Amino acid sequence: MAEENNQTLGIVAQYVKDLSFENLGSISAESADKQPQIDVQLKINVENSKEKNIFYVALVTKINAKLDSPLFILELNYTGEFVINGFSKEMMDPILYVECPRLLFPFARSIIASAVSEGGFPPLYLAPVNFADLYQQQLESQNQTIQ
C-alpha cells in the first residue's frame, strides 16, 4: 500500500498587526495634475510559533509619497498565521517567502488603497509583486555575500 503524502498549507488567521498613516501635507490645486514620487519598501518577516507547524508570515510595507514636499507615510504590518505540514525542508523557504506572501498580498494591497484614500489622497493601488523573483534575488545576494 502506498504511503499517503499529507501536505497542508492553510491560513489559520490573517490580520493587521500594525497600521500607521501620517498625512504630512495635502495636494494643492496647482500640483493636483502632477504625479507624486512613491517609494515602496516591502519586507517579509517569518517567525515560528511555539506550536509545531504554525508559522507567522508578515508583509511589512513602508510607503513614502512626496511631490515638492512629503505628502504621506504609510506603514503596514499585515500578518498571516499559517499551518504548514508535510513539506520537505528544501520546500519550506519557498513556501514561507513566496507562497504565503502571495496569499496575503491582495488583502494588504486593499488595506493600503483604503488607508491612503481615507487619508485624503487618491487610492494607491500597488502593482502585483512577483514574490518568486524577490526570493530569487535574496538568494543571489546571500550567495554573493558568502563568496
Image (tube, grey):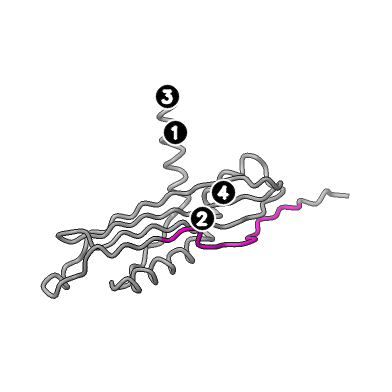
| Amino acid found under the numbered disc labelled 1 | Gln
Distance between the Cα atoms at labels 1 and 4? 17 Å
Marked residue nearer the N-terminal end (2 or 1) = 2
Q: CA distance from mark 2 to mark 1?
A: 20 Å
Q: Main secondary structure of the magenta part?
A: strand
Give the residue drawn at x 46%, y 38%. 139
Q: Give the Cα separation between the discs numbered 4 and 3.
A: 25 Å
Callout 1 touching callout 4 (CB < 8 Å): no
Residue hosting label 1: 142
Query: Which residue is denoted by mark 2 in the rendering?
Result: 101
Residue 9 in magenta? yes
Which residue has dot 3 on it? Answer: 147
Q: Which residue, given by chain and number where applicable, does mark 4 sit on?
A: 96
Q: Secondary structure at mark 4?
A: helix
Q: Which residues are magenta?
A: 6-19
Residue at 58 percent across and 49 percent down: it is 95
CA distance for labels 1 and 3: 9 Å
Under mark 3, the amino acid is Gln
Q: Amino acid at mark 2?
A: Pro
